[in-house]
Amino acid sequence: MKKWSLLVVPCLFLFIVGCSGNESTNPEKWDRSSGYVIAKEAQKILTVRNIPETGDFSVSELLEQNKPDAIWITVKNPEVYDTISIGDNVELGIEGAIKNSYPAQANATVKIKN
């Protein structure tokens, strides 16, 4: 019995330590109610949780920095789409389901915050 516990305890410890490494670096979950526009195409905007205040970053760099907090939004109020610019802080009113891809995908009404 003692030999069995000498084997099980270290295995259990390794299992617990190994599983704890899967936590996100940002523990607060993004509610996708607002974000920053980093790309536009065909009535869609690509929105991320945060953008750096300084520097020039590509879309792929911004996606990597924000992973998993990015979403393609199909803009449901087309009169607003033309007024949206890259870098705008927008409010999102998501309608329906969110497709779990990266970036995620959803339909939403959009309002410019700034």
Image (cartoon, grey):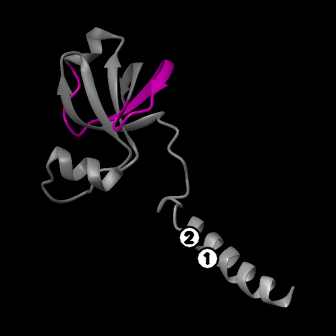
Which residue carries the number 1 mark?
Answer: 14
Rendered residue at 51%/20% (across/down): 97
Of the 4 image quadrants, the one containing the N terminus is bottom right
Is the C-beta separation of discs 1 and 2 under 8 Å?
Answer: yes
Q: Does the segment drawn in magenta span residue 55?
A: no
Q: Residues within 10 Å of mark 2 (few under 14, many from 20)?
A: few
55 w.r.t. 14: above or below: above
Amino acid type, mark 1: Leu
Which one is nearer the viewer's eye here, 100 or 30? Answer: 100
Which one is nearer the viewer's eye here, 103 or 47? Answer: 103
2 w.r.t. 48: above or below: below
Q: Does the segment drawn in magenta span residue 87?
A: yes
Residue 70 tag number? none
Which one is nearer the viewer's eye here, 73 or 97? Answer: 97
Which residue carries the number 2 mark?
Answer: 18
Rendered residue at 34%/24% (across/down): 73
Rendered residue at 55%/53% (across/down): 28
Q: Which residues are magenta?
A: 83-104
Residue 76 in which image quadrant: top left
Residue 5 in which image quadrant: bottom right
Give the SS element for disc 2: helix
Q: Position of residue 17 (x, y in %)?
A: 60, 74
